[in-house]
Amino acid sequence: MMDVDPARVVERVHEVVVATRGGEVPAERVVAALAALRSVREELGVWEPELIAAARAGGASWASLAPALGVASRQAAERRFLRLRPSATGETTGEGRVDAERDRRAGDRAVADWARSNAAVLRQLAGQVSALDGLDAAGREGADRLGAALGEDDVTTLLPPLAAVRAHLPRDHAGLADRLGAISEHTDQLRRDAAGHRRGAAGS
C-alpha cells in the first residue's frame, strides 16, 4: 500500500499528463508517474470492495449501488463486487470468484431443498443429540447449539451443528455418528452436483 496521500499522488500524475500535452517530458518523469498511478489503482482496488461491503451491511441494495459503480443492473453490481473482493476459496481471478460464489449459492439451494424435504428426520436427529448425556465440553456446547436451532423455522440451521457434534459423540453412539456422517457426505455431494449442473447449463 502507498505511504503517501493518494490525492497528492493523483495531483502529481495529472501534472505530468498536462506537461506531456504541452511538449516533451523526460521519460523518467513519465515512468515515475505511471508507477505512481499503478499504486493509486491498487489502493482504489482495495477500497472499492470494502466500501461496497459496508454499503451492503448498511442496507443498500444492489440496485441502488449499480449507478454508483457505473453499471446498468443489480446483477452487474453484484458481479463487480464478486470480481473485486478477496476470495475465501482460493480463486485468484475475478471470473473464478464469480463462478465460486455461484457454485456456493447453487449448492446452498440444493441442500436447503433437501433439508426442507427431510425436516422431520433432521429434527428428530437433532432432538436425540441435544438430549444425550456423557458428552464432553465441546460436545455439550454443540448439543446446546442444536437445541437452540430446533427452535428456529429454518431447518438448514441444524446442519452445521449436527456435523460439528459428530466427532464428540461417545463410542456407544456409533450408530448415531454414522447417520450424521452419512448426512454430511450426502449434503457435500449435493453441493458438488449442483455446481456441476450449474456449470453444465452455463456452458450449453
Image (spheres, helix red, strand yellow):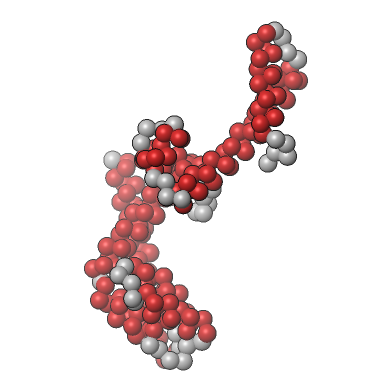
The number of discs equals 0
Give the answer, above or below, for where 57 lies relative to 129: above
- Furthest toward the top, the residue is 23
Determine the residue positioned at 31% across, 63% down.
112
Residue 158 image offset from top left, x and y in percent: 36, 72
**Residue found at x 41% / y 70%:** 160
**Residue 175 can be seen in this image:** no
The residue nearer to you, when weighing 169 against 119, is 119
- Comparing 95 with 43, the one in front is 43
**Quadrant where the C terminus lies?**
top left
Residue 167: x and y in percent read: 47, 79
Asked which quadrant contains residue 120, the reply is bottom left
Residue 146 figure quarter: bottom left
Q: Quadrant for residue 187, please give it.
A: bottom left
* Horizontal and vertical percent position of residue 69: 46, 35
Say which residue appears at 57% left-offset and 42% top-offset: 47
Task: Locate residue 106 relative to residue 57 in the image: left or right.
Answer: left
- Residue 83 in view (yes/no): yes
Which residue is at 45% across, 74% downward?
164
Q: Quadrant of the N terminus?
A: top right
Residue 151: x %, y % from top left: 33, 76
